[in-house]
Image: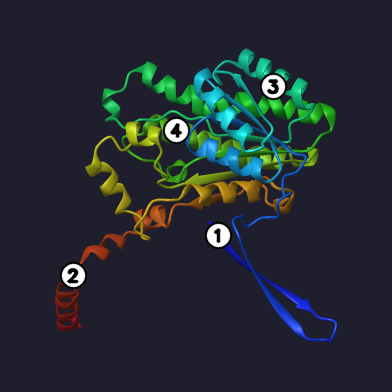
Amino acid sequence: MQWLIIYVQQQGNGEIQLVFSIEDNMFEKDLLKGKVALVTGGGTGIGFEMCKRFGSLGASICIIGRRENVLEKAVDELRKSGISAEYHRCDVRNPAEITESVDYFMQKFSHIDILVNNAAGNFVSPTENLSPHAVDAVLGIVLHGTLYMTLELGKRWISSGRHGVVLDIVTSYAWTGSGFVVPSAAAKAGVLATVRSLAVEWAKYGIRHVAIAPGPFPTEATRKNLFPLPEVEKLLTERVPMGRVGNMDEIANLASYLVSDQAGFINGEVVTIDGGEWLKGAGEFNNLLDLTGEQWKLIREISSKKS
């Protein structure tokens, strides 16, 4: 995304001159300088886009995930862009692996300032077809993994007196619920409760908790698990009042602001970025957007006769 920046300069003779500059970044280049960000599931999709943006703003990047080849490729790309980055293979469902990964990053960077709980697992299915294993697969990554990571970093921050910020990726159906993704809805609701609970409990330690609830931001994984058919993706996109899906730089920019010191007074808040999707679904009469002009004319005629 490009931004037009206008600088006002006063010349020696007292005249005012406007200087126009087109820049690719909406933030100060050193917004996250000196920060170390740990992103779970940061090797692909939204997680990797956040890593790239954090790194471009001066942060050092730590990535964890289960597939070492994916992690290696992601870190190699970050380093080619001049970003300081490390990875460690880790399954967030395993607390021992989390501790090992955090120890590794602490040896490399001596501190971690930002935790982004982005790792997730989800798929669409009639709920009656789910097995206990399928339920556990989602809850283990989304809910347990988020709590394990938050506890690991939170305890270290509290014991050392270091401030930190936790950014959790949730979803708008965390507060409305949704059919066909019940394990994810249950897990994300738990994560949302964690954000709002720890925002109060840990604020005294200088630890902030914030969250983002994204709408449709198609990635390779979401297309495979959530939009497996073109008809499904079309149906879900039509739910968005703005008539499109999200761009990756939009969510990366939002995340960069929320984890920065500039957002230091935002705590316990969830920012929805979905083009108005959930609001359209929540309104009882929002489906009337599909009515034609002739149908509205008929409604007016019927209503006027009754009055």
What residue is shown with label 3?
A: 102
Identity of the amino acid at label 1?
Answer: Gln
> SS of the residue at dot 1?
loop
What residue is shown with label 2?
A: 292
167 sits to left or right of 34? left
Q: Residue 110 versus residue 164: which sits nearer the camera? A: 110
On the image, the x and y values in percent for residue 3 come to: 58, 63
What residue is shown with label 1?
A: 2
> SS of the residue at dot 2?
loop
Q: Earlier in the sequence, mark 1 or mark 3?
A: 1
On the image, the x and y values in percent for residue 234 come to: 26, 48
Choose top left, top right, bottom left or bottom right for residue 193: top right
Q: Which mark is residue 186?
A: 4
Is 291 above or below relative to 228? below
Identity of the amino acid at label 4?
Answer: Ala
Which mark is in front, 4 or 3? 3
> SS of the residue at dot 3?
helix
